[in-house]
Amino acid sequence: MDYNVDAIEREIMLKYNDYRSYNSDNDVLLSLRKDIINKQVLANQKELLPDIIAFNDALREALREMYDRAHCIWNKMINIIDEGDGEELVLTAKCYLDTDYPVLHPIQGEDRQDLWYALCDGDLNPMYADGVSVLTLTLPRDEDDSFDSFIGMDCPPPNWNEGLDQELTQDLHLINQFHTLFQHMNFALSDFIYVRKFKTEINIEIIQ
């Protein structure tokens, strides 16, 4: 492992284990770590393609299941509240990377699970607080949006491969949530492409 990355990761874990040390430097540390690792791994994108594809497919499937389940729950719930009583139902569905450190990751060690907890912490990594989507699936706001729209596959070209080798990844149909994790959240590419399990969270709120 790169010595600089190792030092940064130790500092990140120290901050994670002591909430009193949370400050504006957290984002700088995570962003610096991400940039260093991505510079290394993006030089060998071809080797990563199988895992990029497998992750994108697994994430798509998890989001599909979440989308279908959220709409199923919503369709059963909408008749519970009488529209005339001044109350409104709002359902939000969120998808997260599994909290267990990826067993497929080529770097393993006793400290990897602690680092993973830190990377997935919504306080240290605030853009990730609501999961892999910047805009969560919210009903009834998104009731008429198709699944393709939710994952960004309804616009040409249907491939969110910004920041990657354009020719190498031109036919991968990477979804918007892949792009969000890669471009907008403080995960290095090699942090998440080995994830195959996800957690979903569906909440229903009654607004008076």
Image (cartoon, rainbow, N blue to C red):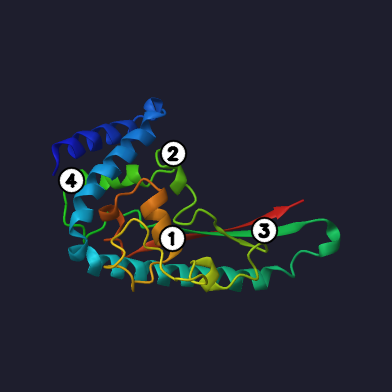
Residue 117 at x, y percent in the picture: 33, 45
Observer-side mark, 3 or 1, equals 1
**Of the residues under marks 3 and 1, which one precedes in the sequence?**
3
Mark pair 1, 2: CA separation: 20 Å
**Of the residues under marks 2 and 3, which one precedes in the sequence?**
3
Q: Residues within 10 Å of mark 3 (few under 14, many from 20)?
A: some
Q: Is residue 109 visible?
A: yes
* Extreme-right residue of the structure: 84
| Residue located 51% across and 70% down the image | 155
Viewed as shown, does residue 116 lie left or right of 3? right
**Of the residues under marks 2 and 4, which one precedes in the sequence?**
4
Kindly state the secondary structure of the residue where label 2 is placed.
loop
Mark pair 4, 1: CA separation: 29 Å
Residue 71 at x, y percent in the picture: 60, 71
Observer-side mark, 2 or 4, equals 2
Q: Amino acid at mark 1?
A: Gln
Residue at the spot of label 1: 177
Displayed quadrant of residue 186: top left
Residue at the spot of label 2: 123
* Extreme-front residue of the structure: 167
**Of the residues under marks 4 and 1, which one precedes in the sequence?**
4
Displayed quadrant of residue 204: bottom right
Residue 199 at x, y percent in the picture: 42, 60
Residue at the spot of label 3: 90
Residue 160 at x, y percent in the picture: 41, 63
Residue 174 lies, with reference to residue 31, above or below; the image says: below
Q: Nearer the viewer, residue 89 or 23?
A: 23
Viewed as shown, does residue 190 lie left or right of 68? left
**Of the residues under marks 1 and 2, which one precedes in the sequence?**
2
Residue 117 lies, with reference to residue 51, above or below; the image says: above
